[in-house]
Image (cartoon, rainbow, N blue to C red):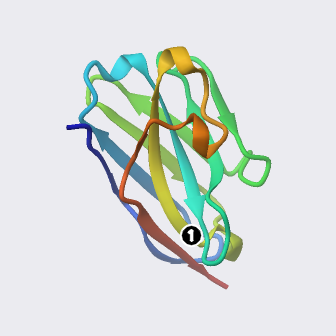
Amino acid sequence: QVQLVESGGGSVQAGDSLRLSCAASLRPVGTYNMGWFRQAPGKEREFVATIMSSGGSAYYADSVKDRFTISRDNAKSTVYLQMYNLRPEDTAVYYCAATYWGRGPMFARDDVQYWGQGTQVTVSS
C-alpha cells in the first residue's frame, strides 16, 4: 500500500519560514516524480512545486517561485518543501503528491497518482 506522510506544518507569522517533509513508501522512490499541491478554504487544490524523479529538474507555481524550494533525498525516500517569507495567502492544507516518472511532471490534479493526507500551514499577518 502506497503511503505519503506529510509533516512540518504549523502556524507562523508572515515572513517566517517552514519546512514540510513527505515520507514516501514508494519503491523504488527514484522512479517517481514528486510534488506539492495546496488547497485553501473554498478554493480548488492548486499546484505548488514538483521535482523530477532524478532530482535534476524542478518547477514552481509563479506565486511561490523564489520563495519556496523543493528537494528530495531518494536514499531517505523523502521530499521536502522549504518555504521562506511566508504570506497569509500561503495559508492552506499542503498535500504531497507522486506520479510514476513516465507520466511526466505534475502540474494538475489529474497528473497525480498518489496523494498524502495533507498538513495544515497557517500564516497570520
Residue under label 1, please give it.
Answer: 92
Q: Is residue 97 above or below residue 93?
A: above
Q: Is residue 117 above or below residue 122?
A: above
Q: Which residue occupies 26% across, 43% down?
A: 3
Looking at the image, which is closer to me, 22 or 112?
Answer: 112
Where residue 121 appears, x then y in whole percent?
50, 70
Quadrant where the C terminus is found in the figure: bottom right
Where residue 63 appears, x then y in whole percent?
77, 54
Q: Which residue occupies 61% across, 27% down?
A: 105
Q: Is residue 124 above or below residue 4?
A: below
Looking at the image, which is closer to me, 30 or 13?
Answer: 30
Q: Residue 38 is drawn in which quadrant? A: bottom right
Looking at the image, which is closer to me, 85 or 25?
Answer: 25
Q: Residue 16 is drawn in which quadrant? A: bottom right
Residue type beneath disc 1: Ala
Where residue 42 appears, x then y in whole percent?
65, 77
Q: Which residue occupies 66% across, 63% down?
A: 44
Disc 1 crowd rating (10 Å Cα; few below 14, some 14-19, many 20+) is many
SS type, badge 1: strand
* In-image side of 60 versus 39 (left or right): right
* In-image side of 106 versus 114 (left or right): right
